Image (spheres, rainbow, N blue to C red):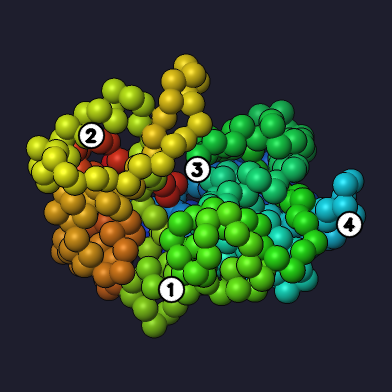
Amino acid sequence: MAVFAEEVNLAGYTTLRLGGPARRFVEATTEAELVAAVRRADDEGEPVLVLGGGSNLVVSDDGFPGTVVRVGTRGVDRSPADGGGVRVRVQAGEEWEPFVARCVEDGLTGVECLSGIPGRVGATPIQNVGAYGQDVSETIIRVRAYDRRARKIVEFGREECGFTYRHSAFKGHDRYVILEVTYELRESEASQPIAYAELARKLDVEPGATVPLKEAREAVLELRRGKGMVLDPADPDTRSAGSFFTNPILDAERLAELERRVAERLGPDVRFPRYAERPGPDGEPRTKTSAAWLIDKAGFTKGHALGPVRISGKHTLALTNPGDGSTADLLALARQVRDGVRDAFGVELVNEPVFVGVEL
């Protein structure tokens, strides 16, 4: 049965431990409860915020002036897939990290490099969650959702999801409420080919090699812990929303401008990280660079503080609330970093977390 409450402080439901009260709060534990709660709020004409694990969310200090529906649905079903794989249907409220752990334990490959990421399954297609050379878009084959505009349940195949780098057809609006995600994984004791150079070095293999599935998972967890990216109540650096900015993807003109600025600021022999990306809609080549590198070289090093909030002491891409900061404090730091990178290198950083009632 759904649980209703009023004036619930949202700080307790986000990994940043920030955010004011929700006027109404509903915990939905079944698909029917989830759809009914959203429909009721829509019928009453009030705003709706669908909340999962709160790991990718920045909420206003004023809170949310409507209904927050927390997704608490549970269930994982496994069936054979055409071609020898395994299809795993997962309810949106399942916690992501335990799901990945279960897949690795069961010898299912395809999500092992996404170990240690906080949050719930329903958020993974929205953000096209990815890390260490894997994206969920590689394994998602179907998304079941409630369409608030059409007031019915709909399904999306992989192509219809519109996956791109940290983006999808579900991001940037609130039309769809994710109910269930289906992944197609492969039975194997070996990982997928290791695509990420840092992970390959950690495993002491060449990029493209495979390793035992459990070794890949443990290496990822160790790398993430070293960056404060695995939730730990004893570690204030993990009180963050993960990576606060996405890695910039530059066209040829903006890449040339960055090259010029780096040479002027840091010297002609300095090389910045660059990775080839898919061509843009215009067919022109795109290059991805490192937001963390740009932040550091713009003068914002690990531990840089602004009042009670700071850049993580382990990773320049995470903004943390180690004490009694506010959302306003966090945004002031984010603006300082964003503006500093733009002034230094001409690159505009874009926030990765979802903003609720606030903006940069």
CB under 8 Å between callouts 3 and 1?
no
Question: Which residue is tagged 3?
Answer: 166
Which residue, given by chain and number where applicable, does mark 4 sit on?
79
Image x and y of residue 221, in percent = 51, 72
Secondary structure state at the residue bearing disc 1: helix
The crowding category of the residue bearing disc 2, from other C-alpha atoms within 10 Å (few below 14, some 14 to 19, many at least 20), is some
Which residue type does callout 3 highlight?
Arg
Q: Which residue is mark 1?
A: 225
Q: Is residue 282 left or right of residue 239?
A: right
Q: Quadrant of the N terminus?
A: bottom right
Callout 4: few (<14), some (14-19), or many (20+) C-alpha neighbours within 10 Å? few
Which part of the image, by quadrant, shows the C terminus? Answer: top left
Residue topped by disc 2? 258
Amino acid type at mark 4: Ser
- Residue at 18 percent across and 51 percent down: it is 297
Compare marks 3 and 1 and give the one earlier in the sequence. Answer: 3
What type is the residue that disc 1 sits on? Arg
Which of the two discs, 2 and 1, labels the residue nearer the N terminus?
1
